[in-house]
Amino acid sequence: QVPAPVCMPPIEDPSQEQTWVAGVMRQWMDEEWQPMECHGVIADELARVYIEQRVDCGHDDLSEVMYALGPALMVECPQDAFYDSFTDPFEVANKLSEYLMLRMGREVCCVSDEDIANFERYSKEALQD
């Protein structure tokens, strides 16, 4: 049986959403490995492509957006960014999908306690800004 799609809520403020995506993903990469400049480049490009998929293309199905992010990052992100990092476009897209599901209050399989703590810490910090 095919699971029902996960429909994301509309984005009310694309700029704020882009900032959140870039911030939570950079924090994840910096904490997962070590702070590196390439993490900012990757996170910023991921956030830009995510907003493009959601706002410009009108996609609200989480899996549809995530399937588009990996290939888009392979083409649009500076190649040296991933070369210098310890991750890849598909791992980054998958991690973002986990964080988006956590933010929607959905159950996420295979998410670590560290990922949940990172998500909660970043979300709390973002609310204070």
Image (cartoon, helix red, strand yellow):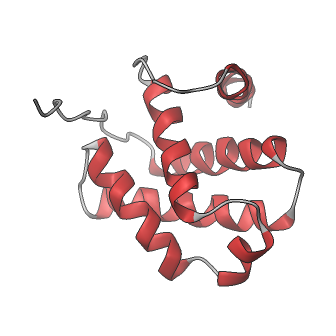
- Which residue is most to the left? 1
Name the quadrant of the C terminus.
Answer: top right
Answer with left or right where residue 8 lies relative to residue 30: left
| Residue 52 seen in the figure | no
Residue 3, quarter of picture: top left
The location of residue 64, given as percent across then percent down, is 27, 52
Between 56 and 68, the residue placed more toward the observer is 68
Name the quadrant of the N terminus.
Answer: top left
| Residue 60 seen in the figure | yes
The location of residue 109, given as percent across then percent down, is 46, 24
- Which residue is most to the front? 1
Placement of 71 over or under 14, stated as above or below: below
Placement of 81 over or under 85, stated as above or below: below
Residue 9, quarter of picture: top left
Q: Residue at x 89, y 51 (%)?
A: 34
Q: Number of labelled discs?
A: 0
Q: Residue at x 58, y 53 (%)?
A: 92
Between 10 and 118, the residue placed more toward the observer is 118
Answer with left or right where residue 100 lies relative to residue 112: left
The location of residue 95, given as percent across then percent down, is 55, 43
Q: Residue at x 34, y 57 (%)?
A: 67
Answer with left or right where residue 56 lies relative to residue 21: left
Residue 12, quarter of picture: top left
The location of residue 89, given as percent across then percent down, is 55, 64
Q: Residue at x 43, y 72 (%)?
A: 72
Answer with left or right where residue 72 lies relative to residue 62: right
Placement of 35 over or under 98, stated as above or below: below
